[in-house]
Image (cartoon, rainbow, N blue to C red):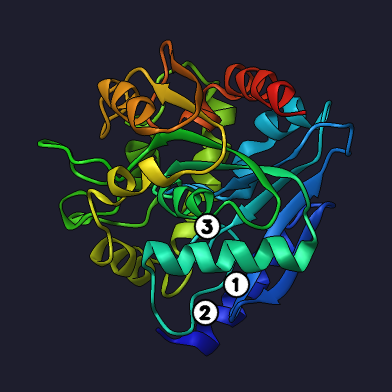
Amino acid sequence: MGSSAFCKELGELRKERAVANSHFAAIDGCDVHWIDEGYANGLPAVLLLSAQWLGASHFDAFAERLGERTRVVRLDLPGHGLSGAFGDEDYCAARYASLVRAFVEHRGLGSHVLVGQSHSGIPACLLAAESTGGMAGLVLATSSGMPRDRAVPAGSPQVALHRTGSMNWYADRLRGLFKRPHSPTEFGAIAAAARDYGELPGREAESALRLRHFEPDLLARTLPRVAVPALVLWSEASTYLPAAMAEAIAALLPDCRGRTVIHDTGHLLLADAPRDAADLILAFLETLA
C-alpha cells in the first residue's frame, strides 16, 4: 500500500490538522490518532469511533457538549482521519475490535461507553458482547451490519466509480449524508477535511479492503450477545439505512435503554445533529452512573 509515501504525507497532514488535545501512539500494530478532552465527573467516559468519510475532528460540537459533563475520547480508526493503516491489510470488524480493545488497555480508560456509528458500530458491538475492559454501555448510531434489501454502502465501487478527489466531489458525496442546514463555511470545512483524509496515499485502497471484509448481517448475529446496557440512535433520513432498522436492533438487544430516531437528520448523525445526540447520550450515561 506504499507505506513509506503514506507515512510521509500522513505526517505532513498531522502537522496541519492536529489540535491541542491530539495524541499519537503505536497501538496493536497501527499508528493511531485520538483527541482526548473533557473531565471525569462521576459519569462513564465516552469513547467515540470514527465513521466513513469522517475523522475525529468532524465531531467538535458533539464532543464539546459531552465534555461539559464527562471525558470524551475520539479515536480515528485505521483508514480514517489522522490514523495510519493496518500493516497486515486486515480490515475486518474483528481486527478493528482488536485495535479498540488494545487502545482501551493502553489508555487505561476505565469505565466507558463505546459509541459506534455507521460501519464502526459493528466492532463496537463485538466488544460489547465481550463486556471486558471496563465497558459500561454501548451506543449504536445509525449502525450498519443488519441485513437490507436495498442500499449501497458508502465507499462501494458504485459510489466511487467517478471519483475525482476534488473538493466538489467530496462535497457532493457529503451532501447526501447530511440533512440539517449547515452554513457554507461550516460545510466547506467538513468537505475540506474529508478530502484531506480521503486523498492520503493508500486511503482509497483501505476503504476497498474494509468493504471486501464487510459482513452485512454481522451486527444482527452479535446483538443478542451484547452484555451491557445499550442505546440506539438513528437518522431519520439515512441514505443507506432506513429508520425501521432502529426498532429491529433494539428488539435484538438484551438490555436496550432507549431507541430514538432523530428528526431531520442524514446518515452521518453525530456530525449532522451533534447536540441532540449528545443530550440523549448524556441522559443514557446518567442511568449508568
Where residue 211 appears, x then y in whole percent? 27, 61
Label 1, secondary structure: give it.
helix
Q: Looking at the picture, does residue 274 appear above or below residue 146?
A: above
Name the side, left or right, on which 68 lies relative to 49: right
Question: Which mark is first along the chain, 2 or 3?
Answer: 2
Label 3, secondary structure: give it.
helix
Where residue 1 appears, x then y in whole percent? 40, 84
Name the side, left or right, on which 59 lies relative to 65: left
- Choose between 179 and 136: the one closer to the eye: 136
What is the crowding at mark 1: few (fewer than 14 residues within 10 Å), some, or many (at least 20)?
A: many
Residue position marked by numbered label 1 in the rendering: 10
Q: Distance between the residues labelled 1 and 2?
A: 6 Å
Amino acid type assigned to the residue bearing label 3 in the image: Asp
What is the crowding at mark 3: few (fewer than 14 residues within 10 Å), some, or many (at least 20)?
A: some
Q: How far apart are marks 1 and 3 (CA)?
A: 10 Å
Residue position marked by numbered label 3 in the rendering: 196
Name the side, left or right, on which 252 lies relative to 12: left
Residue drawn where x is 61% and y is 63% of the image: 101
Q: Looking at the picture, does residue 121 appear above or below residue 102?
A: above
Residue 279: numbered disc:
none
- Choose between 201 and 28: the one closer to the eye: 28
Q: How far apart are marks 3 and 2 (CA)?
A: 13 Å
Residue position marked by numbered label 2 in the rendering: 6
Where residue 162 appears, x then y in whole percent? 19, 54
Amino acid type assigned to the residue bearing label 2 in the image: Phe
Mark 1 touches mark 2? (CB < 8 Å): yes
Name the outermost residue toward the top: 263
Q: Looking at the picture, does residue 6 appear above or below residue 264?
A: below
- Choose between 78 and 184: the one closer to the eye: 78
Label 2, secondary structure: give it.
helix
